[in-house]
Image (tube, rainbow, N blue to C red):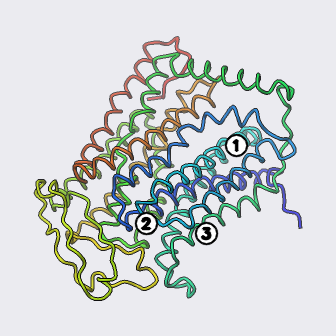
Amino acid sequence: MRLPNLLASKWGRLIAFFCLYVTEGIPLGFTATAIATQLRRSGVGPKEIGFFIGWLYFPWAWKWVMGPIVDLFYSNKLGARRGWIIGMQVMMVITLMFCVPLELTESNLTLLTSIILIHNFFCATQDVAIDALACSTLHPEERGLANGLMFAGQTLGIPLGGACVLYLIDGISWLPMLQDGIPFEQTYFFVAGCILMVTIFVALPMREEPLVRKASDGDRGAAMRKEIGDYLKTAWKSFFGSRVAFAALILAVIPAGAAALNLALQKTLAVELGMTDGEIADMEVVGSVIWAACCVTGGLISDRVGHLKSLAVFLVLMSIPTLWLGFEMERQGYIMPVEIVQADSKSKAGEAPEKTTESSDAAEAGEAVAVGAELSHSELELDSEKEDSVAAFSRNVPEGLADSFWWAVMFYMAAQGLMYGTRTAVFMQISNPAVAATQFTAYMAMMNLVTAYTSWWQGVVIEGWGYPVTLFIDASTGLICLAVLPFLFQKAVAEPSVSIPAPRD
């Protein structure tokens, strides 16, 4: 039985691009949530996890470089865009298989990061090809709905790769075969299977119209150089051709609001506060639903009130739960990340493990929680099938702090959702219509670069100065972009000759 070509009908195209975008969200959820959570359980510190997550976003910051390559190098026999999509999805699966024998330990972190970095490079390149296929395939009257479905697909893919994997590890009570959970290394096959399902049932049956080559085979190198040269000229004019565009460039390369409660800090702190894999998965699912709903709501509000005014309010809202959690952690004396003690044979035999103490920085910070106390045997009793992934902590969690963390994350996800759609609308309206694809794609790529370097510095600050200081700095630096917003509006009004329109406000 031959599978249908989804590109041949309107609803087929909408379903196809929804599913293709799911495969973009799966790797981000798997690496940034599932792997990061298990790394923390195995004793890897916040600094290393921050660098790990930062590197995951790095390929997405440079995906615009692949644009000319995807445009110029293709085979009509495979499908100009279809060939790239299928090839990248296959390589995504292969790189995941290389990770299966690797234990999630600090000694393997460099190798694991390198493989996952390559994995995300293939995923980011796939995104370029999918967007190119959408531009050439979708009809004008379909693009609005299609973009909404594509964004929804990516949002769904993140918990599919993150939360669902944590559920599988923690165990699913209503499935007899999975009640006790599965080892983490088996989850790679689940993630790979999700990607291959889209490859087999969506990408492979697709048939796209052949593209007319812009140059003969002998001129491909010259065409490539010309394409890159034209691209650089266009990019320069788009970003520096007006003061409004330059202000937008600054807005794209600095943090847009606080970020810690949706980055590495969220994952490492969730583990330290004693949340199980299932509870962390619940948090991700609920947070993703809230985020998606608020993203739509924020767009509707900004269309009525004004994009810049709404964006300013939403940015401030993002700092409120961040500051509140920081003050709450400081009040309860939870300052530095805890030492993790892997339960060993001694603990399983009924002996207490060696005492661990926090660094002197924790004591100097006035930490009120007892550190270095012996752990009872009951605290370290392990399930025989999961003993390698369970870690014990050298500190009791203050009462109510886990609940405060949960609510801070939920309120933050709502505020970030409101902000995200509104910020995207600002960049869309600023982009020069003549080069909108190039300019807007670059803005989106720079936002991923911001996510990468923010995750890096936060991991360093957590280990050096503790969680509250990291949250305070995050909330403060996230508000710097408020100083840029007036230039996006006022300069455009003062210079009516500028061809790039400013956001309505």
Q: Residue type at mark 1? A: Ala
Seen from the viewer's position, the closer of residues 244 and 188 is 188
Residue 475 placed where, x, y %?
29, 44
Q: Kindly indicate the quadrant of the structure image that contains residue 210.
A: top right
Q: Is residue 64 left or right of residue 375?
A: right
Task: Please state the total of marks drawn on the protein image.
Answer: 3
Circle 3: is it few (<14), some (14-19), or many (20+) Cα within 10 Å?
some
Q: Which residue is mark 2?
A: 38
Q: Earlier in the sequence, mark 3 or mark 2?
A: 2
User: How far apart are labels 3 and 1 at the CA level?
Assistant: 24 Å
Seen from the viewer's position, the closer of residues 289 and 388 is 388
Point out the image quarter for the N terminus.
bottom right
Q: Residue at x 49, y 35 (%)?
A: 446
Q: Earlier in the sequence, mark 2 or mark 1?
A: 2
Circle 2: is it few (<14), some (14-19), or many (20+) Cα within 10 Å?
many
User: How far apart are labels 2 and 1 at the CA level?
Assistant: 32 Å
Q: Residue type at mark 2? A: Gln
Q: Residue at x 62, y 29 (%)?
A: 438
Which secondary structure lies at badge 3? helix
Q: Residue at x 63, y 56 (%)?
A: 23
Q: Which residue is mark 3?
A: 190
Seen from the viewer's position, the closer of residues 358 and 153 is 358
Nearer the camera: disc 3 or disc 2:
2
Q: Is residue 384 left or right of residue 258?
A: right
Q: Residue type at mark 3? A: Phe
Q: Which residue is mark 1?
A: 129
